Amino acid sequence: MLHAKRKHPPGQEYELSEDGRALTTFSLSAGRSGTRVTLHGFDYRVRVHRFSGVHELLDAGGTVVATTDRVRRSWRLTCGERVVSFRRTAAAGREHTMLGDDGEPVGTIRRTGHVHAEATADLPGLELVLQVFALVVVLLRGRRERGAAAVRAASLTGG
């Protein structure tokens, strides 16, 4: 199981661990269109296409390893010929369920903690890099939703 925790809330730098062992850190700093992650000595970049909502996982050479379609209530992660479906199963994007080929739940990604400062991913059957990619996608989507909500609130209050 993966666990991501903000180092210093309200900052956007996360520590990522797997079953209690530290893996890496990554940052979701504002203004960035994604993040960089190093796993077992390999560098990856998660890129977000701002207007389409598509996320891509790229290796150090810039080759696309995996993609998602637009992350909404239901979305898919594609890696080569493999397609993994996810469905949002809790309000405000707090939980996304990974679905098996039969459409039944087989794993989850949950945003937890005070101000959603933590997230866990239990995604059996997915390679580690794809688990990290899916977790980062959910965190990036949550950040985007919180930013949009803040803009709406400011416009409603006249501020």
Image (cartoon, grey):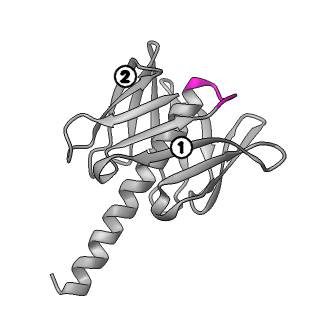
Q: Residue at x 27, y 78 (%)?
A: 153
Q: Residue furthest right?
A: 102
Quarter of the image containing the C terminus? bottom left
149 or 118: nearer the viewer: 118
Q: Position of residue 100 (x, y in %)?
A: 77, 42
Label 2, secondary structure: give it.
Answer: strand
Segment tinted magenta in the rendering: 124-128
Q: Earlier in the sequence, mark 2 or mark 1?
A: 2
Please rate how many residues cluster around mark 1, counting C-alpha atoms within 10 Å: few if below 14, some from 14 to 19, many from 20. many
Position of residue 35 relative to residue 18, above or below, is: below
Q: Residue at x 52, y 58 (%)?
A: 53
- Three-letter amino acid code at disc 1? Ile
90 or 62: nearer the viewer: 90
Q: Give the image quarter of residue 157.
A: bottom left
Q: Residue at x 57, y 24 (%)?
A: 128
**Distance from label 2 to label 1 (Cα)?**
18 Å
126 within the magenta span: yes
Question: Which residue corresponds to mark 2?
Answer: 24
Q: Position of residue 26 (x, y in %)?
A: 34, 32
- The answer to whether the residue labelled 2 contacts the one labelled 1, judged by CB atoms less than 8 Å apart, is no
Q: Give the image quarter of residue 8.
A: top left
Label 1, secondary structure: give it.
Answer: strand
Residue 109 badge: 1
Prevailing secondary structure of the magenta residues: loop
Compared across the picture, whether 132 is left or right of 35 comes to right
Q: Position of residue 60 (x, y in %)?
A: 47, 24
Q: Position of residue 61 (x, y in %)?
A: 51, 24
- Three-letter amino acid code at disc 2? Thr
Q: Residue at x 42, y 41 (%)?
A: 119
Q: Nearer the viewer, mark 2 or mark 1?
A: 1
